[in-house]
Amino acid sequence: MAKAHRSSLRFEVAIMSRLMVGGVDFGQPLIRPMCSAGRGNAMAEKVAIIGAGLAGAVCARALADAGRRVCVFEKSGGTGGRLSTRRSASGEFDHGAQYLTARGAAMGALLARLADAGAIASWTPDGKDRPGDWHVGLPGMSGAVKPLLAGLDVRLRTPVETLRLAADAGVEVVTGDGARHGFDRVIVTAPSPQAHALTGALDARFDALGGIVYAPCWAAMVAFDRPLPDLPDLWRGADDAPLALIARNGSKPGRTGETFVIHAGGAWSARNLERPAGPVLEEMLAALSAHAKGVPAPVHAAAHRWRHARVDAPLGTPFIESACGRIAVCGDGMLGGRAEAAVDSADALVAHIVAGGGQAVPARP
Ligand SMILES: Cc1cc2nc3c(=O)[nH]c(=O)nc-3n(C[C@H](O)[C@H](O)[C@H](O)COP(=O)(O)OP(=O)(O)OC[C@H]3O[C@@H](n4cnc5c(N)ncnc54)[C@H](O)[C@@H]3O)c2cc1C
């Protein structure tokens, strides 16, 4: 069943600097007003956003704040996309992205506002090996998108299966339950193979999505019933190994339990992608036992396969828009392998739309 989430939390995403993404100037400075969701402007443009990951959440928040009527369709049962948290009786696991960092203005502004909203906190693990401030979502990584989506119409467990250009200059969105929804504009934030499946037949411009390359990642979520002091909070290994990253999830703020997330390397994950989860998990656990002394049998162990984990070869342009201006694709695949790329891509698209880019849309009831 589709589920709508509404709350009254107000949240501001303001980016006051002139937007420069990938060396391209995207127009006017954006000063976005406080959340205007729910003010019920029936004449406002109706925008469907496919995907409630970081790119979708940034688009949704900014467009709602700019007066659009926004509806977010998410195929899974939760928000956050690859900013993902799995819960178990033994504790929680951030089995996708481990932490967020900002190099540019848009991500810096977003992280500052998420921190103000109490949705992220700093994480300085024992073993921190890269510069900059590291931030994690609260209470898990998926918590980082919650303030962005608060008060908006978010439909969980609602996959979008088909997009059609409608005769009335809108776009018809067909969801998994067969329902048809009319919108003025659609933004697709799914990883590029899924985005292309929705858009490829509508405009040849979207064929460029085929050039984006993702590395897969096998992730293991492991909990123990006693402390393992020989394991650091963070450790990185080789890309062609079953043990490319160990993160002590319990060392992140707000987490509980002796919980670890293990990521296999991209090359190793690619070679083992189609194997069943059971043997993959066994191999990753054996590698963990070989890595540290005295690792006991876990009280919880599960594996998750990310087919599209980190972007290895991005498109290099912040978004693709159809010639008619009614459909656009954004997300990390456009610009790079970090969550910040998803934010920059979404931000560039929003700036383009708010500046009047794309079609001159009719208002629909
Ligand atoms: C294992 C792993 C480790 C990572 N580590 C880091 C890290 O430490 N730091 C960092 O910065 N980044 C990291 N990343 C990358 C980061 O997670 C991504 O760059 C970022 O989350 C991408 O956001 P997005 O919104 O573009 O895409 P996603 O998060 O993939 O969001 C897309 C959403 O669209 C939904 N969707 C897809 N198809 C449909 C459909 N047809 N209908 C409805 N919904 C649909 C999906 O369910 C998903 O929720 C990591 C990723 C992984 C997987």
Image (spheres, grey):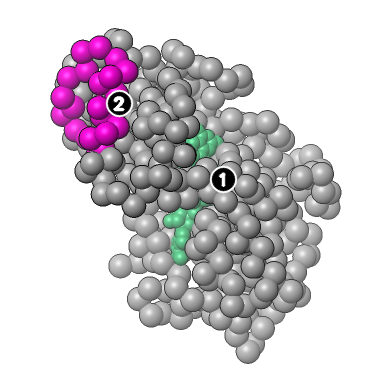
Nearer-the-camera pick, 33 or 209: 209
For the N terminus, which image quadrant? Answer: bottom left
Q: Position of residue 341 (x, y in %)?
A: 63, 43
Of the residues under marks 1 and 2, which one precedes in the sequence? 2
Q: Amino acid at mark 2?
A: Ala
Q: Which residue is mark 2?
A: 287
The label shown at residue 311 is: 1
Q: Indicate yes or no whether the magenta region holds residue 292.
A: yes
Q: Residue at x 40, y 61 (%)?
A: 75
Magenta residues, start to end: 281-302
The label shown at residue 357 is: none
Q: In terms of image quadrants, where is residue 14?
A: top right
In this view, 174 is above or below 115: below
Residue most extreme to the bottom? 167
Q: Position of residue 188 (x, y in %)?
A: 57, 63
Q: Is mark 1 within 8 Å of ligand 1?
A: yes
For the C terminus, which image quadrant? Answer: bottom right
Q: Indicate yes or no whether the magenta region holds residue 66.
A: no
